[in-house]
Amino acid sequence: MKNREQKQKDLEVLTAQFQEATAAMLVGFQKMTVGQDFALRKQLREAGIQYKVVKNTLARRAVTGTQYEGAMESFKGVTAIATSTGDPVVLSKTISKYAKDNPDIFTFKAGVVEGRVVALRDVEAIASLPSKEELISKVMFLINCQAQRLVTVLSAVPRNLAIVVKQIGDQKSGGEAAS
């Protein structure tokens, strides 16, 4: 059994985790096997997401005064928290994929993305968005594409001029050879 100091330390760690996170998902699970739990934790860890099963009273205290306070009523039953300090799309994709693959054992309770409480349909909508890295690469491609087109157009003028000068030179050479 944990003493008062250990409980206070757990509360501080969980509060700090909530304060640093940009998004969090509250999930419930029933009859989850060790293998399924291991697979979920592995997927979340690879995505850079922190996952922790918490006591509801501890979690309610930890979210007090944070942007996650709106989800306080969702701390009922068996609760786990997945938090991300990075892109909320990655968290949403990972959680929604696992929830779809395991609907009998895994349930979505609530989500908070950038201070706003979201429902499951919102999480699925967020999950369908491209990630931040994908969006940046698309923008960079569009910028590069336009730059390539500009270079092609600008290099066409001297190239075409050189072709015309060469053709004129060839005509004069051909005309002198005929005489």
Image: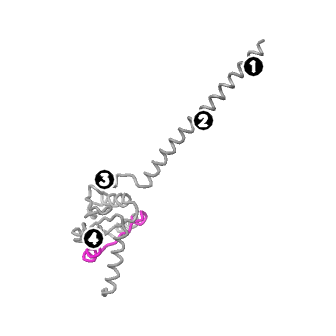
- Per the rendered image, the range of residues in magenta is 44-62
Residue 149, compared with residue 29, is above or below; it is: above
In the rendered image, residue 49 lying in the magenta stretch gets the answer yes
Residue 37 appears left or right of 107: right
Q: Which residue is mark 2?
A: 155
Kind of residue at badge 2: Ser
Query: Which of disc 4 and disc 3 is earlier in sequence?
Result: 4
Kind of residue at badge 1: Ser
Kind of residue at badge 3: Ala
Query: Which of disc 1 and disc 3 is earlier in sequence?
Result: 3
The answer to whether residue 34 is seen in the rendering is no
Mark 3 against mark 4, which lies toward the viewer? 3
Disc 3 and disc 4 in contact, CB within 8 angstroms:
no
Neighbourhood count class around disc 4 (C-alpha, 10 Å): few under 14, some 14–19, many 20 upward: many
Q: Quadrant of residue 167?
A: top right
Quote the CA–CA distance across marks 1 and 2: 27 Å
Q: Which residue is mark 4?
A: 79
Q: Which residue is mark 3?
A: 125
Quote the CA–CA distance across marks 3 and 2: 45 Å
Q: Quadrant of residue 103?
A: bottom left
